[in-house]
Structures are given as C-alpha cells and as structure tokens.
Image (tube, rainbow, N blue to C red):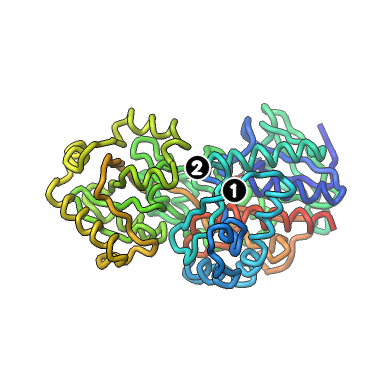
Amino acid sequence: SEQTYDVVVIGAGGAGFSAALEAAEAGKSVVILEKMPTVGGNTLISGGEMNAPDNWVQHALGITDDSPELYYQDTMKGGDNLGQPEIVKILSEQALGSAEWLRDEVKVEFLSDHLFQFGGHSRKRALIPIGHTGAELITKLKTKAEELGIKIKTNMKAEKLLTDESGKVVGVDASTNGQKVTFHANKGVIIATGGFGSNIEMRKKYNPELDESYMSTDTPGTTGDGIVMAQAVNADITNMENIQTYPICDPVTGVISLVADSRFDGAILINQGGTRFVEELERRDVISKAILAQEGRYAYQFWNQEIADIGKTIEVHQDEYDQLVKEGMLYKADTIEDAANFFKVDVETLKETISKVNEYAKTGKDLDYNHRGGLVSLEKGPYYIQKAVPSVHHTMGGLVIDTKAHVLSTEGTVIPGLYAAGEVTGVVHGANRLGGNAISDIITYGRIAGQEVAK
Ligand code: ADP
C-alpha cells in the first residue's frame, strides 16, 4: 500500500518524537515509523537525565556560575575535541531551551531540587526527570504527538530511502508483518533510528575490540539501520570506531545500572583486592578501561546509607535493585566485614581504603584520585556493595549532518530531502559522549530537524 505525508520520521525515540512535534507544530502532516512493537528506543530505558547549562534547578541550588561556554568546553574536551565545533556550539547554546521546551510545551516534569554531575562535567548541570528514567520523557512526548495528530506506526520497519531523478529523498519503503508499505514524503525524511550498539557485526566492522565478549545496554532495535539506509543514497559517515561502554552494568545481563547512580552522590569503586583504582567521576571510557585492567575485568561499587539517601536511587529503581540482589550481584551489609566477605574482597585492604576515604572526606581533598565532587564519609553503615562490568552503551559515530540537521553526502553536499538527528549522527560527541549529553543532543537536533524540514 501507499501513503503520503509531508514528513516521514524513522524511529520513535527522543530524537524522532522531537522532530515530529516541531514539524507538526509548523503545520505539516507527520508520520513516525517504528520497527519495534513499542515506542521509546533507548531514550525510554535511559536514565533520562539532561544537561542544560545555567538551568532553573541550578539557580534553586545556588549554582550561578555555569554557562553555555563552560558546557561547550566540557563537551569538546570530553570527546577529545573530535566533536565538530559548530555542531557542539549549537548544542551548548540551545540545550537549556530544549529543556525548557520539554518542561513547558511537552509537560515533562523534572525534579526541582536535585541534579547529577556526570563524569567529565565541571558543574552539576543534569536535570533529572521524575522517576529517574526516560519513561517520563517518552510518555509525555507520545501524548503530545497524539494531541497534534501525528501518526505513529509501530511494527513498521523502514528498509529503503526512495529518491527522485534529481537525487532528492522523497519517501521510504517500509514493511510490516512481511507486507510492503511505501510512505511518500512531500517535504522530507528524518532519520532518527538511534545507534548500532546491539549489532555485533557492525560493531566489529568498525571496532574489532567491541566483539561478542561485550554485552550491550541497548534495546534490540539498536542495529544501525539508518546509517546503512543513508549510505545507500551516498551519505557520509564519521567517527564510527568510537563506541562507548558504560562502566557500571549488570554482569549477568549487561543492563545499565541506574541504582548505581549513587556513584554521582559519592559511591566509590574498588577492585577484588579492595582498593580504589580510578576517580569515580572520570569519563565513562576512562573508568571502563580502568575496570577492564583489574583482576577479573570487573569492579565493585561501594556506598553507605548516607549516600543512598541523597539520590534515593534504590527507591526509584526498586525493581532493578531487587533483580540485582536476586542475582547475587548486589548485597546490603551491616558492616564493612560483612560486605567484603560476601564477594570475598580482602577485608583489611577494604578497611584501609575506607579509612582513607573518610579522611579525604573530612579534609575535602582526595589525595589518591582527586575526586572532583568531593568524597563522602563512609564511616557509618549499613553498606551496599555491587559487582559491575562495562557494557556497550552508545555509538558516537554515524551520519554527518550540518547545523541544520541536513545529511551530507560523501562529497560534503546536502542530500536534498534528508535529515538526521540523535544517536544515528556522528558529529556531536567525538571520542566519548559525556553523561546526560545524549538527551540534550537528541532533543536539540531532533527539534532542529523538524523545524528545518517544515521550511
Ligand atoms: P535517539 O536517542 O537517537 O532518539 P533511540 O534509540 O531512543 O534513539 O530511538 C531510535 C528508535 O528507532 C528506536 O525505537 C528503534 O527501534 C527505531 N528504529 C531503528 N531502526 C529502525 C527502522 N529501520 N525502522 C523503524 N524504526 C527503527
């Protein structure tokens, strides 16, 4: 069958929804194609935190010295300066506007009194949606999309971009339950299909190190389809070898641990021997590498009730907590001895490590790893100890876009009618994406793509 819309969006994650909303607000008819039975992609299962410099929660907490410029510097540096400066500049200037748009137009609720300072950020600047996951974002984005009359087709896999004689992208061939459906696009097609972290063959093609020995935090739909489809119409790709592992994941399933977000409130990392080995607020790639260099290629995260009470990560992720306990990967202990014995960590070494942490917490200076958030005293129990491994999380590489979210060809020219936003693009995060920057990126560039296609 055949259907015609002004705009066809491929992928119903945060980028796809943002693009669709902007195009619909501009009066265009819009359809979103989603290959999975449900919407949301990795946006849904993420922590949903979003960096925005100089935001309202920072002001409420008395943080008044953040700026787009600082955020720009952190993001560029965090990616080893491999992000494209003009692309990152727009992200840093518009991230706050994107957050306000989510809050005011989409009615996303953020915590009013708590922020995260993810690794590599020089300020606490990540807004946290209620529930501490992307579910708040996706639920509200979907509601708004339905209000605006956007058609959402699940179980609809985009397979091929269609072009006219001039090379302009004019539609998409898709399939549902083995049946072909052609979607014609009067104005353009937006690719928002996410990354390729779940596609082991594709990972190995671009970075042989990330083979089947790594699990992935990603949804099964994260297979790089948009990259392959766009390459078939001569789109350029970049940065493909840069694949991020998230350091703290469930060793049984590979799933990202959000309970372990207690790390941003002061939890420490130790090895089997019971010593710290890295700054806990270092970049994800640095921590992952450090963990893989330890005996057994895993680590333990260790914290106490006082730290747990700051971010309440156990209460807000109770299902995950119960699952980890059931798997024997997380243990609540009354004493340090008890915690160490559960995982056969050397008790005396762990005690020494902790007394050093307590001392550094008092003096405010971590003489071993220079913890940028300041260590928190672990004097009082009860304690939590959690086993963790790195797991493939984000693919920094992908399609080359310009500042208007046009997809560029291998000759560096705009491919007419084709736009892309979100994890499928490869020009934002360079060698390493900082925590909280995916949501800022996908919402900002999703909106840009939607505004531009409507012009
Ligand atoms: P982003 O964070 O960039 O928005 P997500 O992972 O949240 O990325 O969302 C991407 C969405 O695109 C997922 O829901 C995924 O299932 C969907 N998707 C991927 N490939 C296709 C395809 N070929 N056709 C339709 N949807 C796709």
Q: Locate residue 327: give its quadrant.
A: top left
Secondary structure under the numbered disc 2 in the rendered image: loop
Secondary structure under the numbered disc 1 in the rendered image: loop
| Residue 85, position as x, y percentages in the image | 60, 72
Q: What residue is at 74 percent from the left and 64 percent from the top?
A: 414
Tell me the crowding category of disc 1: few under 14, some 14 to 19, or many 20 or more residues within 10 angstroms, Cα based: many
Q: If the image is split into quadrants, where does the N terminus sit?
A: top right
Q: What residue is at 85 percent from the left and 40 percent from the top?
A: 4
- Is 20 displayed left or right of 256 in the figure? right
- The answer to whether the residues at label 1 and label 2 have Cβ atoms under 8 Å apart is yes
- Along the line of sight, the residue nearer the viewer: 441 or 82: 441
Q: What residue is at 67 percent from the left and 28 percent from the top?
A: 178
Q: Locate residue 176: give its quadrant.
A: top right
- Along the line of sight, the residue nearer the viewer: 381 or 331: 381
Vertical order, 356 against 19 (above or below): below
Circle number at residue 194: 1
- Is 180 displayed left or right of 384 in the figure? right
- Whether disc 1's CB lies below 8 Å from ligand 1 is answered yes
- Is 389 displayed left or right of 222 in the figure? left
- Along the line of sight, the residue nearer the viewer: 255 or 300: 300
Residue type at mark 2: give it: Asp
Residue type at mark 1: give it: Gly
| Residue 136, position as x, y percentages in the image | 61, 40
Vertical order, 28 against 91 (above or below): above
| Residue 307, position as x, y percentages in the image | 36, 47
Quadrant for ligand 1 reads: top right
- Along the line of sight, the residue nearer the viewer: 217 or 91: 91
Circle number at residue 218: 2
| Residue 451, position as x, y percentages in the image | 78, 56
Tell me the crowding category of disc 2: few under 14, some 14 to 19, or many 20 or more residues within 10 angstroms, Cα based: many
Inter-mark Cα distance, 1 to 2: 10 Å
- Whether disc 2's CB lies below 8 Å from ligand 1 is answered yes
